[in-house]
Amino acid sequence: MNLILSLFPGIGLLDMAFEEIGFCVVRGPDTLWGGDIRKFHPPSGIFWGVIGGPPCQDFSSLRRSEQTGNGLEMLGEFSRVVTEAKPEWWLMENVARVPNVTKLGHIYAVQRFDINLAWYCDRTRLRHIQFGSMSGRFINVIRRPVTPGLPGAALANDDRSFAELCRLQGLPDNFDLPPFLASEKKRAVGNGVPLPMGRILAEAIKEAYSKPVVIQRDLAGHVTQPKTCACGCGRQVTGKARYYDYSCRKRAERNRTGKSQIVTDQVSHM
């Protein structure tokens, strides 16, 4: 039940977080280690879940040159592997501008929401999560007030020291990557998912599957999408309600007026 597959694992920071929460993680191929996901075909029905963060450079807000096409290709490979593996659920981490993984919406109930590292520690990093489940489950993450003026989290191109980047990512003081050059170490650590954020996501999945769920399907047998909060947090609402609570309504208002620096996407109906 806890066996999951990790795609685009890099040095495995997201994997470490899931392992800490009790998952058993099998790492797929990564270009960092000479692998090629395009040649990878997983067994069907073996993995309970699939996690991963496809390359985000093409979708980054910092990009000033034309997209290479690699970003969309790797999103397609993520979808292909999930389709072949047929897990109960999958989770994809990326930047705010990443497109929706539309190819999986016919099989999975899919949600999309933002998550900020500053909700859990003293540094900020905004990421976007897409999560899909065959059983119609959605995940909820705790949202806490953000203290203004927090330092940014580690980045792939970062002038700070390797030791400082490790600390910002939540890694222990003795963490090292002996086979790597100094610049490669910093890039590899900066590209990873911060451990505090990974733990929150892993715990959210555990919590979602600790409760029973009523699975609703349409006449074609597809899982129907529950009604979710219009602010993009992924939490379910009932009746005529558009927002889960007052804070969700205020967040949506800030996004519409451009007063918030956090970009929130609506739940993806695919």
Image: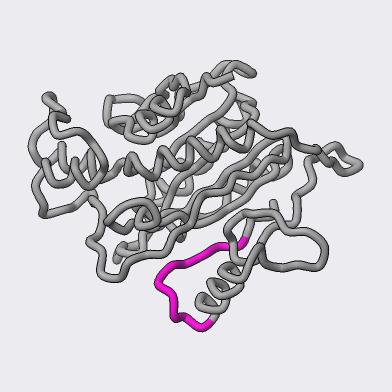
176 with respect to 116 (left or right) = left
Q: Quadrant of residue 241?
A: bottom right
Name which residue lies at 52% across and 49% down: 141
Name which residue lies at 40% across and 40% down: 198
Q: Residue furthest right?
A: 219
Name which residue lies at 51% across and 83% down: 257
The relative height of residue 247 versus residue 105 in the rendered view (above or below) is: below
Near-viewer residue (231 or 56):
231
**How many circles with numbers are drawn on the protein?**
0
Name which residue lies at 57% across and 53% down: 112
In percent of width and height, residue 1 lies at 59, 19
The relative height of residue 5 versus residue 108 in the rendered view (above or below) is: above
183 with respect to 34 (left or right) = left
Near-viewer residue (155 or 239):
239
263 is within the stretch colored magenta: yes
In percent of width and height, residue 156 lies at 23, 48
In percent of width and height, residue 27 lies at 40, 23
